[in-house]
Amino acid sequence: MYEVTPIGTIRTPFGEQAGTPIQPGYGDEAHGEAVLDPAFAAGLADLERFERAWLVTWLHKSGDYKLRVVPYRDTRERGLFATRAPRRPNPIGISCVRVLGVEGNVLRFAGADMLDGTPLLDIKPYSPRFDAFPDARAGWLDDEAVDRRRADGRFDEGPSGA
Amino acid sequence: MYEVTPIGTIRTPFGEQAGTPIQPGYGDEAHGEAVLDPAFAAGLADLERFERAWLVTWLHKSGDYKLRVVPYRDTRERGLFATRAPRRPNPIGISCVRVLGVEGNVLRFAGADMLDGTPLLDIKPYSPRFDAFPDARAGWLDDEAVDRRRADGRFDEGPSGA
């Protein structure tokens, strides 16, 4: 067992899961802020020259998980680790957002897919060389069963729904 | 403060940081295994049809962090959150690996850049639609100050070196 301590908080327009974009790419019009504890502000230096960054977050509203879930973009059950569903044994989210600017302890970004108040654990720069594999096969996601871009309530708090 | 509990352990040929690839893309010839606690095996269903997956890990050997570091691929200090250096306030790693196969509770992969014994926190499927931005500007990484692909000892355990 290890302990994580948030380095800040995510601010977005989304107060509840239903209606929130299910991935940053579906929320590019939605802007957000990563507000760091001021003690970490110096770590944001040089980030502004990156077009994109990973926000590593704690999905604090995600609740209990199941090992098989029906993902937002599908109609049948899949293994949890073959989905990006928010309810996970360790509810850690990775969101690739577009960097708009850095001022002091605040990173402004486009592509918000997190709930307002989501704890921030880490920020990493996006590197196409390490992170971009545009031709990678994507299993059931390539089948495109459902073109859903906004969350419904299926992973809301409460008894594990899926 | 939140608690994370490993769901398994990463097996790689790398027993120490020096000589370990600094990113999965530099270790594609190096194979590894994500060995899950058998209780989580059902969550691996459907993952085999994905070409790539994110392994979210706890960088257990990373030690104390500094907010400004000299990254492996540069010669000057950068803000920590503009680097992928392993020593971080929450030492969470994200590695995009190539899926070789799934058998029972074991995911075999290519592109190992983790130390043997690294705790595994989560697995997510790689989706080009969500994760691939091949043309994204990458700040100081685009400047290519140093073409280093293997780690030296600078982020080893002990007093924060960087």
Image (cartoon, coloured by chain):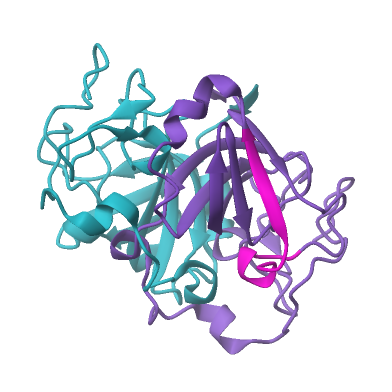
Chain colours: A purple, B cyan
At horizontal 39% and vertical 78% (from top left) the residue drawn is A136
The residue drawn where x is 71% and y is 64% is: A69
Q: Is residue A40 above or below residue A139?
A: above
> Which image quadrant for residue B142?
bottom left
Taking the view exactly as shown, the residue that stands out farthest to the front is A103
Magenta residues (range)? A21-35
Vertical position of residue B29 compared to residue B6: above or below: below
Counting from the top left corner in percent of width and height, residue B153 is at 13, 28
What quarter of the picture does the C terminus of chain B occupy? top left
Left or right of B58, for residue B63: left
Asked if the stretch drawn in magenta spans residue A11, the answer is no
Q: Nearer the viewer, residue B104 or A4?
A: A4
Q: Is residue B25 left or right of residue A139?
A: left
Q: Nearer the viewer, residue B43 or A162?
A: A162
Residue B132 seen in this snapshot: yes
- Establish if B118 lies above or below A19: above
Let me know if residue A96 appears in the view.
no
Q: Is residue A47 above or below residue B27?
A: above
Q: Is residue A23 magenta?
A: yes
Name which residue lies at 51% across and 79% down.
A139
Question: Which quadrant would the N terminus of chain B be assigned to in this image?
Answer: top right
**Tag count:** 0
x and y percent of residue B92 in the render? 45, 37
- Give percent across and percent down for residue A16: 87, 52
Q: Quadrant of residue B110?
A: bottom left
Tell me: B44 left or right of A162.
left
Position of residue B56 in the picture relative to residue A94 (left or right): left
The location of residue B140, given as percent across then percent down, is: 27, 50
Between A138 and B65, the one nearer to me in the picture: B65
Task: Work out which residue is located at the far top of the displayed protein and give it.
Answer: B159
